[in-house]
Amino acid sequence: GINAEYGRDLGVLVSQDLSWTPHVTFVLQQFTNRFNLLRRTLHFVKNPNQRRILYLSLVRSLLEHCSQVWCPYQSGLRDKLEASHKRAIKWVYGVSSNVSWSVDLYHSFLTNIRILPMHLHFQYNDLKLFYKVIAGVMNLQLPNYLYLVKHTDISYRTRANSGITDLIDSTTIGCNIRLFKSSALRNSFFVRTYPLWNQLPVEIRQSSSYEAFSLKLKTHLLSTLLPSP
């Protein structure tokens, strides 16, 4: 049931103190129930590609809904989500959940089937929505403390801002506020996402379409999982 200390809005549990712990706990329970049902009813499916499709469409999709709103920043909650995701990836490959995987091995298996770990998948969802805002393809605008940096905003040229001053980069985001005192605001969608956006290569940020951006972004994020040469 839903406690009186929090309510439901568009399927997301919102607490009075803006903690997302109740919602993450609720979603994890849904995830576990759905995953266990999937394993029991479709135990005859052995093909990893088929299992991958089933997992993404029927189970991980539970973690997609409004994740830009409730994405947890506490390490404990993130670890729980990742552990559930890892257990499902082992099922995709037909590996017992009791088998221990190192981080590198886990990332290798994820890369082979082009699935991101949960912390990167949340970033992926955040950045896709951010692209839509920047591209003006949805009825949502940047908050007044964020702005697109123009070459006229730059006092002197450095290596870091050369893309802006040379009119190559038109998508870097600036912020008028140096310090966000509230943890809820510090970890809100726009505040946590604009630094990730600025860290992306310019050619990804300036993709000509949402589809091209999504493809390039996923490839880029997957590449970060590969061990350094």
Image (spheres, rainbow, N blue to C red):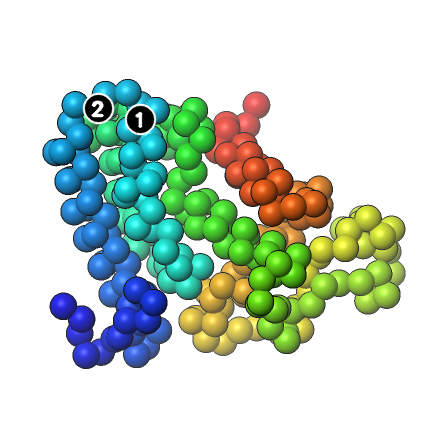
Q: Amino acid at mark 2?
A: Val
Q: Quadrant of residue 115?
A: top left
Residue 28 spot, x, y in % from top left:
24, 52
Q: Nearer the viewer, residue 45 or 128?
A: 45
Residue 104 spot, x, y in % from top left:
40, 28
* Badge 2 density bin: few <14, some 14–19, many ≥20, Cα 10 Å: some
Relative horizontal placement of residue 49, taking residue 222 as reference (left or right): left
* Badge 1 density bin: few <14, some 14–19, many ≥20, Cα 10 Å: few
Does residue 16 appear in this view? yes
Q: Nearer the viewer, residue 65 or 224?
A: 65
Which of the labelled discs sits on residue 206, or is there none? none
Identify residue for label 1: 50
Residue 184 spot, x, y in % from top left:
42, 71
Residue 5 spot, x, y in % from top left:
22, 78
Identify residue for label 2: 45
Q: Nearer the viewer, residue 106 or 228?
A: 106
